[in-house]
Amino acid sequence: MGACVRAATIDDLHAMQRCNLLCLPENYQLKYYLYHALAWPALLQVADCDGAIVGYVLAKLDEECENEIRGHITSLSVLRTHRKLGLAATLMRAAHAALEEVYDAKDVSLHVRVSNEAALHLYRDVLRYERVGVEEKYYADGEDAYNMRKTFREGEARAKVDGDGDVETLRTRVERMGAGAGQKSKKKGTKR
Ligand code: ACO
């Protein structure tokens, strides 16, 4: 059976955390996932394979930005068993579409290890992010991060999202969950 990419619900948060623990050394307490889900419900997407969560993207709005709405990808991963099927690219495009169409973000940024060839290929070559700097010793083990950014061009995300991830569905979903577009908070998450 194939996997589908859909917006996460509160019930998916444990499975997202499990996927993160299996794939990445940068882990987060459950309350950080919950905070994302409550603040920006359209920005958590999961790859669902017959009810099992095999990948996720956790995105948010940049809370440091006072005058502009800018997105940030907190974390992305896909289980080893489901890699190279296009799931990460689909998850990222769903997050881009929500950032652009629901929150009207002007761009999206992320950090990635300088040694992470798979993710770099995805961001640079497939999704057209640009490297805007290097943050030295960004990670706990001392590795540097590339700071990467993608500026949204009118209609780009809309053209790339199909079916259930379309703009009206995303808007309706946000309204149903009672969260306002562009909502901001000063509260921070905690890295474990
Ligand atoms: N080496 C080179 N290219 C790769 C690799 C690899 N190991 N894996 C995927 N790619 C390429 C694919 O070929 C594809 O490019 P193409 O369209 O030119 O063929 C592109 O990357 C996207 O492939 P997807 O199938 O969408 O990617 P996948 O679902 O396999 O997930 C990911 C990629 C998320 C990087 C996965 O390998 C993973 O979970 N890794 C561990 C966690 C991780 O590194 N997450 C990113 C950290 S940065 C952050 O979270 C902001």
Image: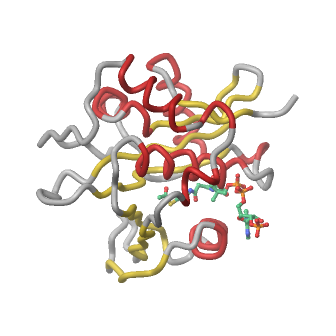
Seen from the viewer's position, the closer of residues 108 and 31 is 108
Q: How many marks?
A: 0
Quadrant of the drawing holding the C terminus: top left
Q: Residue at x 46, y 43 (%)?
A: 98
Quadrant of the drawing holding the N terminus: top right
Q: Can you say whether 24 is above or below 41 in the image?
A: below
Q: Can you say whether 56 is above or below 155 in the image?
A: above
Q: Can you say whether 123 is above or below 133 in the image?
A: above
Seen from the viewer's position, the closer of residues 164 and 19 is 164
Quarter of image, res 50:
top right
Q: Is residue 174 left or right of residue 35?
A: right
Seen from the viewer's position, the closer of residues 140 and 117 is 117
Residue 190 % position (x, y):
26, 43
Colour mapping used in the image: secondary structure
Rendered-image quarter of ligand 1: bottom right
Quarter of image, res 29:
top left
Q: Residue at x 47, y 26 (%)?
A: 13
Q: Is residue 19 left or right of residue 60?
A: right
Residue 51 % position (x, y):
70, 19
Residue 149 % position (x, y):
41, 71
Q: Residue at x 37, y 29 (%)?
A: 37
Residue 140 % position (x, y):
35, 63
Q: Residue at x 41, y 48 (%)?
A: 99
